[in-house]
Image (cartoon, grey):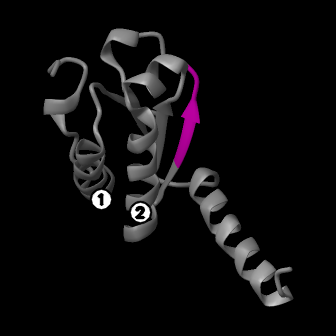
Amino acid sequence: MKSLADLKALRDQTKKRLDLRDGENDYRIVVGMGTCGIAAGARPVLNAFVEEVAKHNYSASVTQIGCIGMCSFEPIVEVIDAKGNKTTYVYMTPAKAQDIAARHIGKGEVCEEYTIGAGK
């Protein structure tokens, strides 16, 4: 059985992870987690974004949604800024997620080479 201190620590960790997914932030990161996205590797991409946002304390929430509708471009991530401007990133990998977190979320610089218009 866990002690009261262990349960409190677990609650605090869970609350911190949930805070990353909700609230008012400068950016909202949305990862397509339909079966097509998951099969293409979206779960490690989602995890990479959650880790980067937490590690660098970026003002961003990380959420998941179902299929975005462009299955041949999976994994797909959409980054939405506070003004509602949306950037769609395609063929995502955990390494690309780290780069996008550092450049787009951290510095406000869109990573054009990963966008839907750039292709692979």
Task: Give the CA separation, mark 1 to mark 2.
Answer: 7 Å
Of callouts 1 and 2, which one flags the residue occurring earlier in the amino acid sequence? 2
Residue 104 position within the rendered picture, expressed as x and y whole percent measured from the top left? 27, 48
Q: How far from the left and from the top, in percent, is residue 11?
A: 75, 72
Residue 103 locus on image (x, y percent): 22, 52
Give the amino acid type for the residue marked by disc 1 in the picture.
Gly
Q: Can residue 88 be seen from the camera position used here?
A: yes
Q: Quadrant of the N terminus?
A: bottom right
Magenta residues, start to end: 62-66
Placement of 71 over or under 102, stated as above or below: above
Taking 9 as reference, is 95 above or below it?
above
Q: Residue at x 71, y 81 (%)?
A: 9
Q: Main secondary structure of the magenta part?
A: strand
Residue that sits furthest to the front in the current view: 1
- The dot on residue 71 is none
Q: Residue at x 47, y 10 (%)?
A: 69
Q: Find disc 1 in the rendering and name its residue.
A: 106
60 is within the stretch colored magenta? no
Crowding near the residue tagged with mark 1, few <14, some 14–19, many ≥20 C-alpha atoms within 10 Å: some
Identify the residue under disc 2.
58
Residue 92 placement: quadrant: top left
* Residue type at tag 2: Tyr
Q: Is residue 81 visible?
A: no
